[in-house]
Amino acid sequence: MKADSKKIKWLLDNETQYGIAKATGVTQSKLSGLKNGKIKIENLSLEVASILTKYAEEKMG
């Protein structure tokens, strides 16, 4: 498992929360918290951060 905060930030800036949630299983409320700063990327579990990083890599090409 690996997590990359820059890739997660890119994902949040470039994809819809709905699309990310549907593809990854991460809740929209968690994604919303990340996007608006209520949840810090550093405070995510490694599992969730890894899922988001993997999805970001897929979307980046």
Image (cartoon, rainbow, N blue to C red):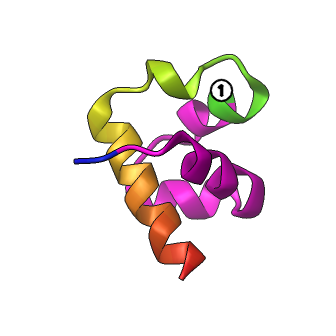
Q: Foreground residue, 52 or 1?
A: 1
Location of residue 10 in the rendering, given as x and y in whole percent from the top left corner: 68, 55
Residue at position x 38%, y 43% from top?
Answer: 3
Residue extent of the magenta highlight? 3-32
Compared across the picture, whether 27 is left or right of 37 comes to left
Residue at position x 52%, y 63% from top?
Answer: 56
- Relative to 24, say whether 2 is above or below: above
Compared across the picture, whether 1 is left or right of 55 comes to left
Number of dots carrying numbers = 1
- Relative to 7, say whether 38 is above or below: above
Residue at position x 77%, y 28% from top?
Answer: 36
Residue at position x 27%, y 38% from top?
Answer: 47
Residue 42 seen anywhere in this rendered image of the structure: yes
Q: Is residue 13 magenta?
A: yes
Location of residue 53 in the rendering, given as x and y in whole percent from the top left corner: 44, 54
Residue 23 seen anywhere in this rendered image of the structure: no
- Relative to 18, say whether 9 is above or below: above
Q: Amino acid at mark 1?
A: Gly
Location of residue 48 in the rendering, given as x and y in whole percent from the top left corner: 36, 39
Compared across the picture, whether 3 is left or right of 59 comes to left
Location of residue 27 in the rendering, given as x and y in whole percent from the top left corner: 48, 40
Q: State the residue lying farthest toward the bottom.
A: 61
Helix, strand or loop at disc 1?
A: helix
**How many C-alpha atoms fall within 10 Å of the one at disc 1: few (<14), some, or many (≥20)?**
few
Q: Foreground residue, 54 or 21?
A: 54
Q: Foreground residue, 40 or 38?
A: 40
Magenta: predominant secondary structure element?
helix
Q: Is residue 51 magenta?
A: no
Q: Which residue is mark 1?
A: 33
Compared across the picture, whether 50 is left or right of 42 comes to left
